[in-house]
Amino acid sequence: MSKLELDDLRTYYRMEEGWIEAADGVSLSLEANETLGLVGESGSGKSTVAKSIIRLLPDNGEIVDGSIRFDGEDITELSKRELRRRIRWKEISMIPQSAMNGFDPVYTVGEQIVQAIRTHESDVSKAEARERTKELFDDLGLDEERVDDYPHQFSGGMAQRAMIALALAVDPSVILADEPTTALDVVIQDRILGTIKEMQDELGTAMVLITHDMSVVSETCDTIAVMYGGRVVERADAETIIKRPKHPYTLGLRNAFPDITADSQELVSIPGSPPDLLEPGEGCRFAPRCPFAEDRCWEETPQPETHGDGHVVECHRADEAEYLRKEANRPETWRTDD
Ligand SMILES: Nc1ncnc2c1ncn2[C@@H]1O[C@H](COP(=O)(O)OP(=O)(O)OP(=O)(O)O)[C@@H](O)[C@H]1O
Ligand SMILES: [Mg+2]
């Protein structure tokens, strides 16, 4: 049994004009100790997936279909209250994308972390919880004395690290880390990812790591899921996604990150803009930007299909991956006339 299993998750946002289909049939699984990288451009639905798991959606957001199983139990069936009591923080913690919003301005950061620890582990004394918090601050490169500061006294990068401390302090079995290191320089970023990794090895914590940064993903993740337009268009072990991807979007992404394709000098990002997710209808959502789109791509939504061990791809042309890969390596393929 997987630690966490999403099956055909659909999370939509209600708007006056209709539904925004932000996560539209997302299936993923996460084992204990595993780090899953969730990548994809802005607006592809990454945060929506994370917020659905821990049920921190805005008021107009709704899980309309599918299931989220934690240790086999469908937690979409739980009331918000039940989920808060049994699952949130205690079992699944989240490092939100904007760390500043994670803290209450009225209390010191240390008080809030101590409180979180003691809420979930009632036998831990205040002094012990404070000690654990200080140790975590130290591991994450924050001055221990900072535990007595208020959130507004923290810079963005410091708040982000304090949020990471909070997420780790409660010893969760799953961490959802939404762009945890974006506000930080590379040295601190490495240190933080190192701290998280150590903790994972020690406690068997699983993590979903959301990021735009493919180099972080390739160094840190065991498996990678690539999102596009509310769907997971490709997932596999990290090496397969990096070396032998099959989906044209993943092929384009690779070209957008020059450090991964060592022989390609030119930085090429994928031309065009993300799809409108307001009731997008049938067809592959990537078709308008895909250099390989055929008639059926516009008409039929490709379904997830397994190509070899755990490699799942949603593309009508995935069987021609070798040809697609060769073509995708040529910068002309991605150039548009306008
Ligand atoms: N409260 C909301 N109401 C309506 N639409 C929303 C809301 N929140 C997000 N969306 C839309 O849902 C889609 C997915 O957003 P989401 O924040 O999950 O993307 P993301 O992949 O996390 O992007 P980023 O990389 O920029 O953080 C986007 O089209 C976004 O505009
Ligand atoms: Mg996001």
Image (cartoon, rainbow, N blue to C red):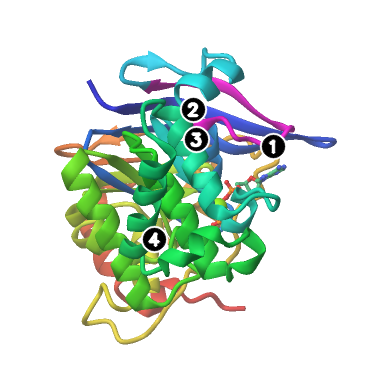
Secondary element at image label 2: strand
Give the mark, 2 or 3, whose residue is nearer the N terminus.
Answer: 2
Three-letter code, disc 1: Pro
Secondary element at image label 4: helix
Q: Position of residue 78 (x, y in %)?
A: 53, 14
* Image side of residue 186 versus residue 312, left or right: right
Residue at (53, 75) in percent of width and height: 336
Which residue was labeled with disc 3?
A: 300
Which residue was labeled with disc 4?
A: 137
CA gap, disc 1 and disc 4: 30 Å
Residue at (33, 47) in percent of width and height: 317
Which residue was labeled with disc 2?
A: 9
Q: Looking at the picture, tell me which residue is in the foreground, 192 or 114.
A: 114
The span picked out in magenta is: 54-69
Graded by Cα atoms within 10 Å as few (under 14), some (14 to 19) or many (20 or more), the crowding at tag 4 reads many
Three-letter code, disc 3: Glu
Give the mark, 3 or 1, whose residue is nearer the N terminus.
Answer: 1
Question: Mark 1, mark 4: which one is toward the viewer?
Answer: 4
Give the mark, 3 or 4, whose residue is nearer the N terminus.
Answer: 4
Q: Quadrant of residue 244?
A: bottom left
CA gap, disc 2 and disc 3: 20 Å
Q: Position of residue 94 (x, y in %)?
A: 47, 43
- Residue 229 in view (yes/no): no
- Farthest right residue? 16
Residues tagged 3 and 1 counted as in contact (Cβ below 8 A): no
Q: Quadrant of residue 24?
A: top right
CA gap, disc 1 and disc 2: 17 Å
Indicate whether 4 appears above or below 249: above
